[in-house]
Image (cartoon, rainbow, N blue to C red):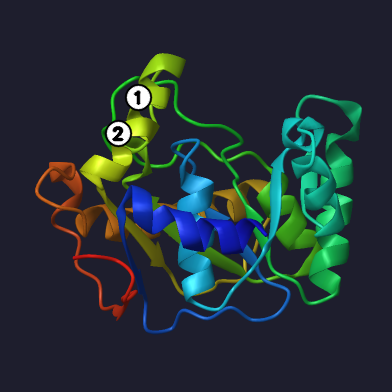
Amino acid sequence: MLSRLSHALVPAFGRLRVTADPAAAFAPGSIVAANHTSLADPAVVLAALRRLGVEPVVMAAAGLWRIPLLGGRLAREGHIPVHRGSRSAADALDHAAAALGQGRLILMYAEGGIPLRTDAAEGPPGAFRSGLARLAGRTGAPVVPLGQAGARRIMSGGPAKQITGLATAPLRRPALHVHVGAPLHLSGDTGARTEQAHRAVTRAWRAAAARLDEHAAPTVLDVHCLSADFPDPSVRR
């Protein structure tokens, strides 16, 4: 449901393009690690992944499961609630490991939250928490780094600004870009694995940000990457 809705709705709110490194692949039982910048970016990422034929299990804040109707649907589809800051937070990794063992793909946000900035500018991924490294080390699952840019143009800042941004996005239709990097197997201790994943997701984010229009951050415009372009006929250029 989440993937289908995102695929249907995101083109109405922005102009999404998807690219990938030549070696990018989604083997069964992979962890897709994405940067998290906005309340809008999960929909952007899911729309991009569905365009590539991928419908992952999503690890998301447990509060979503308390929303009537939505919570039941999330549970039935096997998505995984993360109870941050509680004793049951580790249960999410157990559920994720089980899903990976069944060959499903997991979408994970290792930063654990979105930036507190109020502007809509792009910025590199924040520090990663250890959950991604622990899950990859425990299961041996490959990590597919994914970078998204532009979602902050739909929603960013305080509540009023986010509502305004979402309401005006269908008129503005900002540029959105998702870039998928080549999978990697993390190695070393938890700290080393965390750093490897962070570097890979940052590279993917830089590739995505470099593909935005002239308003992209100047620090990422010098990025060069060989990539395949995945257009969507429903997206206006």
For label 1, the SS is helix
How far is the residue under mark 1 from the one under mark 2?
A: 6 Å
Q: Which amino acid does label 2 sit on?
A: Thr
Residue 180 in percent (x, y) is at 43, 68
Work out which quarter of the rendered image holds the C terminus and state it: bottom left
Q: Which amino acid does label 1 sit on?
A: Thr
In the rendered structure, the answer to whether residue 207 lies left or right of residue 194 reads left
Work out which quarter of the rendered image holds the N terminus and state it: bottom right
Q: Are marks 1 and 2 in contact (CB under 8 Å)?
A: yes
Graded by Cα atoms within 10 Å as few (under 14), some (14 to 19) or many (20 or more), the crowding at tag 1 reads few
Residue 45 in percent (x, y) is at 49, 57
Graded by Cα atoms within 10 Å as few (under 14), some (14 to 19) or many (20 or more), the crowding at tag 2 reads few
Residue at x-position 60% and y-position 45%: 110
Task: Out of 136 and 237, give the one closest to the viewer.
Answer: 237
The answer to which image quadrant residue 122 occupies is top left
Residue 132 in percent (x, y) is at 67, 51
Q: Mark 1 points at which residue?
A: 164
Residue at x-position 85% and y-position 50%: 75
Task: Note whether residue 108 is visible.
Answer: yes
In the rendered structure, the answer to whether residue 210 lies left or right of residue 95 reads left
Q: Name the residue under label 2.
A: 168
Residue 188 in percent (x, y) is at 66, 59
The answer to which image quadrant residue 167 occupies is top left
For label 2, the SS is helix
Residue at x-position 75% and y-position 72%: 104
In the image, residue 87 sits, relative to residue 198, either above or below, namely above
